[in-house]
Every structure is written in C-alpha cells, then in structure tokens.
C-alpha cells in the first residue's frame, strides 16, 4: 500500500488536465502548509512564486523552515518529491501569512498560517496550517470548545479577502482545506462567508480536524454547505471526532459519505500524521468505521464538553495550559518533564477556581460513565464470546465423536477383512500341507485297499466281490444251467460295454 510520498512518485507525471483534482491532492497541499516559507512565498499583494522555486529556496536553508513538532526530515523528503513532479511543480503560491503570538509577549495566544495555491487548471485551493508543537497552538485547539479563537477569526477574514480580490471570483473554482486545526479553520472560514461567496466553493476539506461547537456557528450556513463538506479521518481518530455526533462515529457511511474513514500505516494516535495515510491510485484506502477504542475516548471528551458550561470549560483550559507554560514553549517540554510535569498540572487543576474543579469533576464523571457503559458492553461481548466458544466447542466435540465412530467402524471392517483373508490363507496352507503329506505317505506306505477305500473305490470293490460270488455260485450249478447263465452273463457284459463305448464317443464328438 502506498502513502502520500508514493502517490506523488507514481502519479506526479499526470497533469491536472489529464487527471482532475482529487481528495489525495487536497492532502498534498494541506501538508505543504507545514513548511515555513517566511521570506520565500510572497505575502498579500506581493505577487506569486511557483512551488518549485519556493522549495528550491527553502532547501538553501531548510533549518529556518522547521515547524515544531513535525518530522522535518520526512516533511522535507515529501517536499522534494512535490517540487520535482510535473503535477505540482508549477502551482503558484501567494498571499502567505504566518502568525504566532504567545501569551507572555502579547497577552494573546494565536498560531495561524495560510497559503493561496493557484493550480494550472485555473482552480484555487486555500490551505490552512494545522497545530504545531507549541503550547500556544494546543491551547488554541482546546479553546474552540467554548469560544471563537483568534485563529478562526484570522481564517474567516483571510478567505473572504483572497476571494474578493481575485477578478471574476464568481466564475472560478474554489476549494478550501487543511489538516488538524487547519481543517477546523477551513470549515469555520467557509461557514462565515456570505451566501453568494459560499456558492463559489466546490469542496471544504477537513482532514482530521475537530468540528465546531454547535453554539459557535450559524445553522443555516451549515445546512447550505453540508453537501460540500468532506471530512477525512484515520481509523484510530480522536481529534477529528470532537463535536461529531455519536451516530456518525459509529456509522460513517450513513452520513451520505460526508465522513470518510481511511487506512494508515501507523497504530493508535500516530495515525493522525497525514503522511501515514494509505493511498490507492487517486483515492484513500477506505475503512468501514472508527476504531471502537478511539470512539470511546472521543465520547468521553464530548460528554465532558456538553456537561460543562462555557465558564467551566474556559477555567479548565486556562488553568491547564498555564501550568504547562511552566515547562517551556513546546509540548515536547511538557512531555519530557515526565511524572513531575503531570503532577504539577493535576495539582494546578485541583487548586484552581471552583469552575475549574467542577470541570475536572465532570470530566472524571464522564470518564466513569463511559467506563461503566464500556464495562457492561465488554461483559456482554465476553458472555457472547463464551457462548459462541461453548457452541463451537460442542460442535467440534460432536464432529469429533462422529469422526471417531466412523474411524472405529472402518477399523473394525478392516480388521474383519484382514481376519477373513488370514483365515483363507491358513486354509490354503493347511490344504497344501495335507496334500503334500498325503503324497509322501502314499509313496512310502501305500494304503490298504481292503480297509482304506471310500466312495468310488468302495463301490468298485463291492462290484468285484459280487462278481466273485456270482462265479462261485455258477460253479456249484449243474452243467446246462451253468452254461446258459454264463452266456446270459456275457450278453449283459457286452451290452454294458457297448453302452459305455457309445457314451465316450458322444463325449468326444461334443468337444469343440
């Protein structure tokens, strides 16, 4: 499976005239926004530069363009592939804005960057940068739960100004998008446009960015744009599911395709990184739903947000990030502080205002509620799994018993055949032995015909004895009588001999 860099290598030689703009191109431009082009890409009203030229100048001093919290080596590899591709190299970049204000110097917390991309097919893409690794950026992400942030206001103003200053903007194709917080800014800026300018937007891309609190936007404006909003999130998604309805998380396809769940080469929360999203030709690999574990976490946050008032949310966020500011300007500083950092943050929350403590309590209550529901569901799933296992095992035992009975039956049949064969063989051997022993005995000790005759031999013996008795009787008779009986006897013997000769002749004539 390919990622974003492989997509550029495989399809970067196809122009936008040959293959129109697609959802993957949207993410490519959103990812370019994670490069710092200060002093390279012209600002408002200062002209334009091709993406290839801007990238070449960027790589003269790439260390100056690093964005905190990004894998800059991988980002730079991505940018090199983009600038060398026919599809993206001639895109014009203009109206670049990059604003970062921290609470210590300006009394405000803002992290905002935007680009205007003019594509060769004469369409436009407005891209907003997502959250970087600064505490300021993460504070602003949390602030969208209870207020319109400075970055959102900048985004709304930027989109309106860029569109208005283009000649014949009504007749041109406009797209707006971003990744992470950039997706949220794209959505909010589109919702703030006047209706006639909203009509010029073809698609609003929110690439794994949080939604907007229902209290923060005009419902009629949202209904007008709903069919053109495309939200793309990875399978294990938490950030993008904020302020999304539970039924959408559980059944993305039921939202008329507005929510698109895609595959990633990473696991868990690391799927948020756009360069890991998996691509098939000109579209992302589809997944059927959000990972259940990620959906539970998003539900915990949603329940906390809906149960806490604006004042409680604000107090919680302010106390939380004020405690984080103690460790440094970057989120990595907080993470590197380890357990000491977490204890400091938690202690600060518990020592905070009553609104803060109430918000923390509601958060843990939401965690407990979802945990109980999850536990009940887990028990149900476990019982169902046990039932399925028992049924499966019972079926296996039944099939095993039948197989065993069949095997035993076949074994008995085979044994009976073997015994029958052995018995026939033994009989043949005994018969052979008897014949052999009988022949030897006959040659060595001829049988006594007077005592060892049976069957035909006995019959012939009796017949000879009868003839001998007849001869003796004839001798005792007077001469004439003896002569007449002797003649009769000769006739009888001749008649019997003639009959035997006829039968033998007939048998010979009937042979083939």
Image: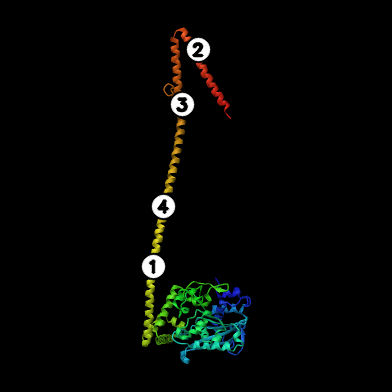
Q: Secondary structure at mark 3?
A: helix
Earlier along the polypeptide chain: callout 1 or callout 4? 1
Tell me where residue 378 sits by quadrant. bottom left
Crowd rating for badge 3 (residues with CA inside 10 Å; few <14, some 14–19, many 20+): few
Mark 3 vs mark 1, foreground winner is 1
Crowd rating for badge 4 (residues with CA inside 10 Å; few <14, some 14–19, many 20+): few
**Front residue of 445 and 112:** 112
Per the model, the C-alpha gap separating discs 1 and 2 is 116 Å
Q: Secondary structure at mark 2?
A: helix
Mark 3 vs mark 4, foreground winner is 4
**Front residue of 4 and 74:** 4
Decide if residue 272 is on the left or right side of residue 47: left
Indicate which disc residue 28 carries.
Answer: none
Decide if residue 239 is on the left or right side of residue 360: right
Mark 4 vs mark 2, foreground winner is 2
Q: Secondary structure at mark 4?
A: helix
In this rendering, the answer to whether 269 lies above or below 423 is: below
Indicate which disc residue 382 carries.
Answer: 1
Earlier along the polypeptide chain: callout 4 or callout 2? 4
Mark 3 vs mark 2, foreground winner is 2
Earlier along the polypeptide chain: callout 3 or callout 2? 3
Earlier along the polypeptide chain: callout 3 or callout 4? 4
Q: What residue sits right under mark 4 in the picture?
A: 404
């Amino acid at each position: 499976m390919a990622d974003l860099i492989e997509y550029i290598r495989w399809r970067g030689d196809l122009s936008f005239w040959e293959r129109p703009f697609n959802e993957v191109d949207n993410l490519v431009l959103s990812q370019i926004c994670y490069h710092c082009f200060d002093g390279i890409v012209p600002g408002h009203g200062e002209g334009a530069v091709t993406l290839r030229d801007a990238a070449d100048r960027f790589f003269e001093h790439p260390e100056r363009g690093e964005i905190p919290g990004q894998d800059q080596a991988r980002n730079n590899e991505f940018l090199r592939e983009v600038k060398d591709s026919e599809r993206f190299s001639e895109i014009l970049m203009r109206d670049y804005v990059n604003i970062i204000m921290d609470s210590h110097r300006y009394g405000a917390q803002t992290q905002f960057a935007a680009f205007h991309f003019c594509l060769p097919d004469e369409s436009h893409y407005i891209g907003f940068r997502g959250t970087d690794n600064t505490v300021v950026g993460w504070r602003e992400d949390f602030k969208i739960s209870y207020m319109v942030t400075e970055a959102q206001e900048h985004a709304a103003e930027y989109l309106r100004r860029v569109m208005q200053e283009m000649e014949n903007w009504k007749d041109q194709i406009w797209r707006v998008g971003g990744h992470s917080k950039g997706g949220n800014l794209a959505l909010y800026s589109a919702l703030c446009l006047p209706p006639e300018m909203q009509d010029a937007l073809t698609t609003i891309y929110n690439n794994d960015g949080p939604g907007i609190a229902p209290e923060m936007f005009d419902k009629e404006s949202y209904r007008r744009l709903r069919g053109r909003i495309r939200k793309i999130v990875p399978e294990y998604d938490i950030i993008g599911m904020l302020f999304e309805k539970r039924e959408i998380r559980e059944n993305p396809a039921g939202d008329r395709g507005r929510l698109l769940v895609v595959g990633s080469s990473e696991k868990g929360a690391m799927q948020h990184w756009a360069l890991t999203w998996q691509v098939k030709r000109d579209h992302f690999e589809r997944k059927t739903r959000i990972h259940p574990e990620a959906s539970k976490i998003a539900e915990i946050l949603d329940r906390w947000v809906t149960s806490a008032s604006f004042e409680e949310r604000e107090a919680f966020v302010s106390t939380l990030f004020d405690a984080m500011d103690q460790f440094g300007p970057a989120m990595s500083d907080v993470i590197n502080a380890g357990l000491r950092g977490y204890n400091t943050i938690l202690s600060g929350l518990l020592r905070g205002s009553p609104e803060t403590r109430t918000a923390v309590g509601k958060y843990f209550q939401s965690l407990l509620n979802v945990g109980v529901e999850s536990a009940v569901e887990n028990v149900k799933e476990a019982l169902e799994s046990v039932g399925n296992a028992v049924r499966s095992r019972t079926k296996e035992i039944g099939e095993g018993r039948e197989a065993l009975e069949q095997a035993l039956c076949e074994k008995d049949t085979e044994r009976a055949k073997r015994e029958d064969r052995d018995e026939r063989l033994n009989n043949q051997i005994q018969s052979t032995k008897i014949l052999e022993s009988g022949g030897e005995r006959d040659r060595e000790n001829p049988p006594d015909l007077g005592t060892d005759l049976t069957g035909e031999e006995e019959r012939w013996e009796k017949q000879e004895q009868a003839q001998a008795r007849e001869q003796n009787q004839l001798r005792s008779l007077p001469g004439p009588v003896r002569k007449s009986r002797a003649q009769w006897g000769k006739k009888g013997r001749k008649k019997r001999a003639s009959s035997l000769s006829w039968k033998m002749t007939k048998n010979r004539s009937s042979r083939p």
